[in-house]
Image: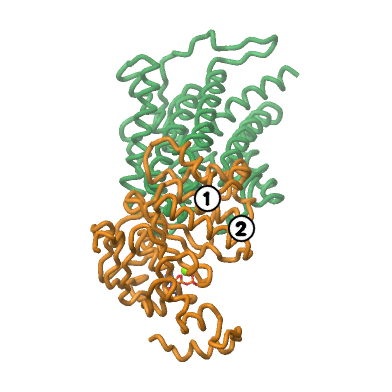
Amino acid sequence: MEFFAQLFINGLSIGFLYALSALGFVMIFKSSSVLNFAHGELLALGAFFFLILSVWAKLPIVLCFLVTLVGCFALGFIIERLFLRPLIGEALIEVIMLTVGLSAMFKGLMLLIFGGNLHNYPDFLPEALSIQWGAISVPSVYVSSFIIGLIFLGVFGFFFKYSSHGIYMRSVADHQPAALSLGVNVRRVFALSWAIAAVVCAMSGIVLGIINGINVHQLSTMGLKVFPVVILGGLDSIGGAILGGIIIGLLENFTGGYISTSLREVVPYIVLVLILLVKPYGLFGSEEIERV
Amino acid sequence: MKDDILLQLNNISVVYADVIQILKGVSLAIRKKQIVSLLGSNGAGKTTTLRAVSGLLKPENGKVTEGTIEYEGRPIQNAAPETITRLGIIQVLEGRPPFEHLTVEENLRVGTAARGTRSYKEDLDLVYHYFPRLLERRKALAGYCSGGELQMIAIGRALMARPKLLLLDEPSLGLAPLLVKEIFQIVKRINEEQGTTIILVEQNANMALQIAHYGYVMENGKIVMEGEASDLRENPDVKEFYLGIAASGALKTYKDVKAYKRRKRWL
Ligand SMILES: Nc1ncnc2c1ncn2[C@@H]1O[C@H](COP(=O)(O)OP(=O)(O)OP(=O)(O)O)[C@@H](O)[C@H]1O
Ligand SMILES: [Mg+2]
């Protein structure tokens, strides 16, 4: 029983990270129908940004977090401006190829600067964050991953539900011509969705970096996990992305715990295929997605 | 006299996809605080004319290739919709597409996009004042609203922007006669009480000419007739073709109307 609870809690906190990064992926897709194949690189960029600030510049940790937030927001904006915007209105496949190209470019740049080996953040998480509960112990990284996931999902949930800009973003996802007719700045919405995606990716990249260390290849592979997550949840559903993330996180941990660690990475994909056989649009995807 | 004009189209031509010419020299003059009706059969180019004004040609791959559009004396042809909406021109799209996954009130709030950060509470009150039904339904998802409610949402959304010039594209499309009457009465009140200038595109010429001050008739991308709404209502051609009333007062059959159209008397 303790073992189960332990796996459950670990799975849940990792699931929150997946959910958070999937949120960024789904948002870009919803607002501009772009499948972002550079998702893993956004994770890695955020993690390395934080590495530069914390290890090379030795800034206080809280400041590192804030600067990473702001920096990645700006980075997302710039990526959209420089690379995506010129392709607005072009065929979907061209835009997808562009994100594949971006992925290769960012990966190459990071390898050039940081090399292919493993880096580590300084130990900054207070021990007090860890939870000891009978035989169950939750290390502080998992607690912080849980907290960060919860905070960001909450903040963005609130932003989309109540703020004017959140509502404009959803209106573009729903019916772009009508949004245009009311003066919604659609290009700004695209840029904003990239900026937010870069921020949430950075957050999950940092926490994954705390857990596993920071390595370009590893983090960009982690990014690929967004595909089972969003396909499971439905490509165009933010709620689905969150649930999909949690399910994949749990599945991985249960498989690793009960069956074998080597199967860990595979089982999510197997379950994904099974679910898609029953529900071809994912758990929450809307069927209109056919249009795309 | 000239001060009186809010919007002027001078001999504009519109081309889609660089080759398909749809408007062939259209000129309109829209007076301040008037309702001007733009009539014409399917494919005449009414929607295209509105798009030329609102800037929504661009996403349709269309362009004003000749002529000018002057709004408050400024040229606006081929400007971006973000720019034009901020000048106070809002187009209500044909078919009243809703933001399905947004609630009625969220749909209305999208209408604040064109006019910055000012608080929207007052504008919401104004919309609910004209459309009390939307107040009752404010928490419902627009995807579940009826056609009449969707038309109210579409007009309400536009009203949130406090437009000076409202472009309405076939608000009566597919609605029950009683509802059409109700919506036209509200449009008329908005014009009178808010001083909003309105271009009303309609197939329902009868209803449109009842609330409009002035009217234009379009055929094949050209203006073929214009006049005071009261004159147009009495005009035998308009009566016969658009109001479906023959000189004798009897309703024309579809076949007769078709035959009439083939003669193309207005070209
Ligand atoms: N995006 C487009 N690309 C190419 N042709 C178009 C486009 N939009 C409209 N057209 C063509 O332009 C012509 C006029 O269309 P428009 O929609 O302006 O007519 P309308 O008077 O509004 O007709 P309706 O009463 O049916 O709405 C039609 O022949 C139509 O096929
Ligand atoms: Mg039309």
Residue at disc 2, CB closer than 8 Å to ligand 1: no
Contact between marks 2 and 1 (CB within 8 A): the answer is no
The chain assigned the colour orange in the figure is B
Q: Few, some or many C-alpha atoms within 10 Å of disc 1 (few <14, some 14-19, many ≥20)? A: some
Q: CA distance from mark 2 to mark 1?
A: 18 Å
- Residue A195 in sight here: yes
Kind of residue at disc 1:
Asp
Which residue, given by chain and number where applicable, does mark 1 sit on?
A174
Give the SS element for disc 1.
helix
Which chain is disc 2 placed on? Answer: B
Residue in the foreground of this view, choosing between A282 and A14 = A282
The chain assigned the colour green in the figure is A
Give the SS element for disc 2.
helix
Q: Quadrant of the N terminus of chain A?
A: top right
The quarter of the rendering in which ligand 1 is drawn is: bottom left
The answer to whether B108 is drawn above or below residue B53 in the figure is above
**Left or right: A244 as drawn, with respect to B267:** right
Residue in the foreground of this view, choosing between A287 and B166 = B166
The answer to whether B60 is drawn above or below residue B104 in the figure is below
Kind of residue at disc 2:
Gly
Residue in the foreground of this view, choosing between A277 and B160 = B160
The answer to whether A107 is drawn above or below residue B219 in the figure is above
Q: Nearer the viewer, mark 2 or mark 1?
A: 2
Which chain is disc 1 placed on? Answer: A
Which residue, given by chain and number where applicable, does mark 2 sit on?
B147
On the image, the x and y values in percent for residue A109 come to 32, 38
On the image, the x and y values in percent for residue A57 come to 30, 19
- Residue A222 in sight here: no
**Left or right: B201 as drawn, with respect to B142:** left
Q: Residue at x 40, y 16 (%)?
A: A62
